[in-house]
Amino acid sequence: MTFPFWSLTAESRELGLIAGVAIGFGFGFVLERAGFGRAQKLAAQFYGTDMTVLKVMFGAIVTAMLGMVLLSGLGLVDLRAVADNATSATYLWPMIAGGFALGVGFIVSGYCPGTSMVAMASGKIDGLMTVVGVVAGQVIWTGIEHLPAVSRLQNASDLGHVYLPDLLHLGPRAGPAIVALAVTAMAVAAFLGADRIEKILAKPAPGATAPATPARRAVLAGFTATALFALAAAALPTGSAAVPAGPPRLTPLELARRVLDEPWKVRVLDLRPLADCAASRVPGAECVPADQLGKLRLADANPAREIVLVGGAGLASPPAAAAAYPGKVALLDGGFPAWKAFALEAPPPPAAGASPRELDTWRLRAGIAAAMTGVKAAPPPPMPSGDAPAPRKKLGGGCGG
Amino acid sequence: MERNPDRFWNPYLAGVALGLVLLASYLVMGNGLGASGASLRLGVAALGVVAPGVVEKSPGLVHAWAGGHPFDFWLSFEILGVVLGGFVGAYTSGRLKWEVLKAPAFPRARRLALALLGGLIMGAAARVSRGCTSGQALSGGALLSVGSWAFMFSVFGGGYAFAWFVRRQLR
């Protein structure tokens, strides 16, 4: 899976920004049409008279979730890669406390941060005040985040990237589909309950949603059918051509990129005998002879980091102890000999008249060899081993920031 | 299309539409939707222009400032789209009107003060929980992040817990 625009690099920047505006436009337009530019309609959720907030939110979550789980079941999208990129790590207690405070702010202002912008755009002065408050509140809080007490509160209970299927110890393929089916069932139950509560509490007021049973029936049936289809797609053993046979393999170049650029995202385990590993290994690798692997208890380890197994040339599949790891497991293609040939030996200089592409490749390889053999500064030290979670991805934080 | 400010989309269909926008965001941008991330960058950039001395005193603000120009941040453009989409939606539905939304008997100044106060609370809360209802609950929830689900239930809890205290404001 590639993210065409996610880094806004030079060549895709303009297209990416246009796509960003277009996606935002869809977001704002739908929120407005759902009635979310109107504080009364949003607040009515908390007085039980109009459950539009719950219906739209859960409906959107179920739609996007089923879309991702289905595409991933068909082998078209790497769900985990998108999720690790698009979500923040779980800080359980800060998120519970922050959620409660945000709920209070929601009912006090009548908006949430996104809908306040829609209200502002439709001319509501109270919406404008809320937007000002959200910006000021974030800036003020960011200004005091370095204070020890605040920082302690904010960074407590860091669980890394953890997802509902991980909690239930379900497999990486069937897990999301099973959880998606359960979430869909819960949402359908919530919809039916919400309609009942509305019927009991709502006064026939302008702005209240007229009952539209055919739409509801179609949406709920669509959700259920898609959830079952996603489960079937995930249950097919290797039915889809896009599902790779065997564990993913990394080339030495890909491993070098990970080790040099994002060492906190990988955990390299060297399965060769201790003496070989002690003599020479991939930077940051832990020496874990294959028969010792069970001691790491990978099945219960935090799945935030990708595990890369480095063996001798003949290692064809991950040992059972590593395959039980809930996160991603990859093998270094060709094992340590391939690494040695790639990273520890300087490549021959290119011949005169080599193409720019060959020159580029040579520069990259020579740079890697130089970094690995200590000619240049050593790569940053790896994270301490064990279950230390990956550090926060972005300090920018904020909403999806 | 007939303009009727009191007509909204069916909530179930609106939910599916919003979900499709979110799905497109995952697939095209590799990221979810967000509302508060960009406002921090914009706020810090504005503060940096008005009072750079204040920014320099706080490591957190310096970090956000050094994180890049707000226009190098796709969420800033997404927010621009949200405002445009909201404007067009309001215009075409007849809801575009310069007004203060409140219960008829509720004082205007108090409504505006509460709107500001609620915004301040939400801004701080969005920092603590790494996102608001859009970025954390919606975008993280659809990807089954544990923290997003804990956050979402907590938001509803906070709203219901405090609804009674401001019950005269909007009803």
Image: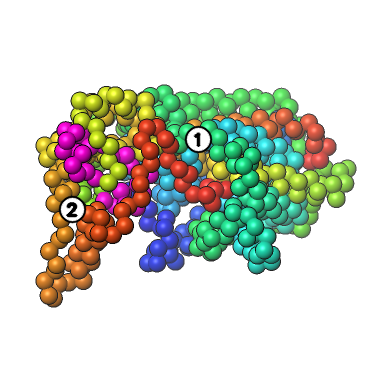
Amino acid type at image mark 1: Asp
Question: Is residue B1 found left or right of B110 in the rendered image?
Answer: left
Question: Is residue A355 found left or right of A138 in the rendered image?
Answer: left
User: Residue visible at 65% across and 67% down?
Assistant: B49
Q: Is residue A20 above or below residue A336?
A: below
**Local secondary structure at mark 1:** strand
Q: Is residue A62 magenta?
A: no
Q: CA distance from mark 2 to mark 1?
A: 37 Å
- Residue at which label 1 appears: A158
Amino acid type at image mark 2: Leu
Chain part drawn in magenta: A256-282
Q: Is residue A262 magenta?
A: yes
Q: Check contact, mark 2 vs mark 1: CB within 8 A.
A: no
Residue B69 percent across, percent down from the top left: 54, 64
Closest to the observer, A73 or A193: A73
Q: Indicate which disc, 2 or 1, sits on the residue closer to the N terminus.
A: 1
- Residue at which label 2 appears: A344
Residue A222 percent across, percent down from the top left: 45, 34
User: Residue visible at 78% across and 31% down?
Assistant: B164
**Local secondary structure at mark 2:** loop
